[in-house]
Image (tube, grey):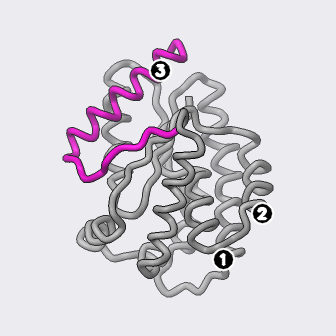
Amino acid sequence: MLITFEGIEGCGKTTQTGLLADHLARRGYSVVRTREPGGTPFGEAMRELLLKKDMDVDPLCELMIIMAMRAQHVDEVILPALRDGRIVLCDRFSDATYAYQGSGRKIDTATIDTLNTMVTKGIRPNLTVLLDIPVEKGLRRRAASSDMDRIEGEDLSFHQRVRAAYEKLAKEDPKRFFVVDANLKIEALHNLIRAKVENTLKSYGI
């Protein structure tokens, strides 16, 4: 099973992914926790370059790099784990590309569709947890925790387009998306996500 976490900067995805991974491991499940961009030695090396603060990267180049990282990630990590019957928790996946490069960078959706279908080999998340939070609040959280990277440092309108894209994706696929209010306390959010995931696992007979 593939469960993905999505949302704008500062929404708490990474924290919630970790909490869920720990909970499922305690329940005896075999869990793989990973992330995009990154997830493999190749991907992590490219991530560092891609997010470098003063790096000037053309939007189409950015998209192609992300797709290259995803191709490696799927082949090296995600597909083998799924074949072994493990639960994969991924901090960002293909929806992020539609939100950030599609809406944020204004790259044509058809281009993303073609490339994404190729590199994911048709893999889609069984469940996507979308942590929703106002852009200004998310960016304040992110800025308070560490230096902003190249994408985090984009202007407000970029991040507003990303949030709007996520909202659109969730409305178009309500069975897959579970939208939660990321303004909630960390433990309250975890409890909501944990309950949803446990029900989803049960529905799949896992």
Q: Quadrant of the N terminus?
A: top right
Whether 26 is drawn above or below 122: the answer is above
Q: Which residue is the site of mark 1?
A: 59
Disc tally is 3
Q: Which residue is the site of mark 3?
A: 201
Q: Which residue is the site of mark 2?
A: 111
Residue 89, labelled with which disc?
none
Horizontal side of 33 relative to 120 (left or right) equals left
Region of the chain picked out in magenta, as a range: 177-206
Whether 51 is drawn above or below 115: the answer is below
**Going 28% across and 37% down the picture, which residue do you hit?**
190
Asked if one can make out residue 38 in the rendered structure from this viewpoint, the answer is no
Q: Residues within 10 Å of mark 2 (few under 14, many from 20)?
A: few
**Helix or strand or loop: what does disc 1 sit on?**
helix
**Disc 2 to disc 1, how far (Cα)?**
12 Å
| Residue 160 found in image quarter | bottom left
Q: Amino acid at mark 2?
A: Thr
**Going 65% across and 33% down the picture, which residue do you hit?**
80
Of pointers 3 and 2, the one earlier in the residue sequence: 2
Q: Amino acid at mark 1?
A: Pro
Whether residue 203 is in magenta: the answer is yes
